[in-house]
Image (cartoon, rainbow, N blue to C red):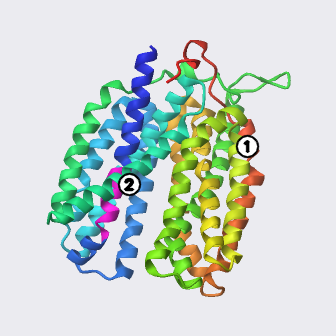
Amino acid sequence: MERSLFGARVATYVYFVLCGTLMGAWVVHIPAVEERVGVSHATLGGLLVLLGLGAFAGMQVAGPLTDRLGARVVVPATGVLCGAALVLPGLAHDPWTLAGALLVFGFCNGGLDVSMNAHAVHVEKAYSRPVMSGFHATFSVGGVLAALVAAGATAAGAEPVVTLAGVGAVSIVIALASARVLMPATPAAEETGGGETGGGETGGEKTSPASARRATAGRVWLLAVLALMVMLCEGAANDWSALHLKDVLGASTSTAAFGYGTFAAAMTIGRLLADRLAARFGSMAILRYGAAMAGVGITLVAFGPWLWTAFAGWALFGLGLSGCVPQLFSAAGHADPAAAGANVSRVAGLGYVGMLAGPAVIGWLTHVVALNHAFVLLTLLCVTTAVGAGVLRTASTPSPRSELADTGH
């Protein structure tokens, strides 16, 4: 049993790396695809919205499907589809075909994202200790791998469509090869009633199943709102950190690139540490104090007049945000493990809306205030998240399983 659980955990790491690699492979080829199709930056921005819409739709379909069929079926299936869809943007020859390609690729990627997170919830439940942040850290590793592969392929003179097809083909093989060690579907009868949201007793009074479901749904939507705010902050950092250093503080283009690099590195380091901290202090503490730290960091960015304050601020911002999303996804999945896929899809879907909206919201604010002062909105969102972190106190947590808790893997 310990060996099969360890194998399921390793397979989950593989799928997170795979998802990050597939998305990263598309991202690093955006300039080449834009040139091939012949669209302007403005048109490309509109087309990228379709990628987000496709991902949102894929999340809503894959979540309930994972609950019904099990992650062992849905995760590899979406991995194969996502690998196959990766080549489509490289084959696009006009805005219409690129629009269709991004919609399909986004749908498949969103399905993989939610289904692998739902499986991660079941793995975490079996371990009876936090492991979710480690999975999210490996997603970033996939992005690094994609950048390295793209750089090597470009240096060798390979066309983008060849590189995308190659990465997609390898991904399909990996997705299929890793499927056999995933955890089987978890019977709903075993999972329900184990957490605080089940139809047990609260304060000496029995809670009806309908009331319990309504309470769980309410908590999940609160988690989704918090995810929207946190991921809006992440999205803003992704698109505006380098521009902040260049346009506000006068840094060179090469120096400004380290703004995002600092944020991303801090995010990765934080996620590698967050599981141990969550095991010791609890997920609510990670969300509350992480959001507070992020608020301090982005405030330093907004008002700091020097480059070193900006770098320190972006580092604190990334470090603080790093553990927030994994705790929210985990809490959504554990709120009702029998509906982990559907609940994670709600939180991830609304969070993804925030990720897409973040850059646009900051852009709109720059019409009325300076870019650095627009970041005050992110401070307010971080403070609100810290205040609302108490919702994790009422979310279900993994039930102890003594025979698995001390596996040491």
Spot the residue most to the bottom.
Answer: 368
Label the magenta part by its dominant secondary structure.
Answer: helix
Say which amino acid is labelled 2: Gly
How many marks the image carries: the answer is 2
- Residue at the image point whose x is 35% and y is 79% from the top: 43
Point out residue 309 in the picture as x, y percentages from the top left corner: 66, 71
Q: Say which residue appears at 36% left-offset and 80% top-offset.
A: 41
Q: What stretch is highlighted in magenta?
A: 20-30
Image location (x, y in percent) of residue 310: 62, 72
Magenta-drawn stretch contains 408: no
Task: Examine the rendering and report whether any part of residue 187 can be seen.
Answer: yes
Going by the image, does 338 lie left or right of 148? right
For the residue pair 213 and 356, the one nearer the viewer reads as: 356
Say which of 60 and 174 sits in front. 174
Q: Which sits in the foreground, 109 or 318?
A: 318
Q: Is residue 390 above or below residue 5?
A: below
Q: Which residue is drawn at 46% across and 38% down?
A: 64
Q: Which residue is located at x 66 percent, y 85 percent?
A: 369
Dot 2 or dot 1, earlier in sequence: 2
Residue farthest to the right?
204
- Marks 2 and 1: CB-CB under 8 Å? no
Side (left or right) of 161 relative to 95: left
> Does the magenta segment cover residue 28?
yes
For the residues labelled 2 and 1, the Cα–Cα distance comes to 29 Å
Q: Name the residue under label 2.
A: 143
SS for dot 1: helix
The residue pinned by badge 1 equals: 285
State whether residue 350 appears in this view.
no
Which quarter of the figure has residue 273?
top right
Label 2: few (<14), some or many (≥20) within 10 Å? many
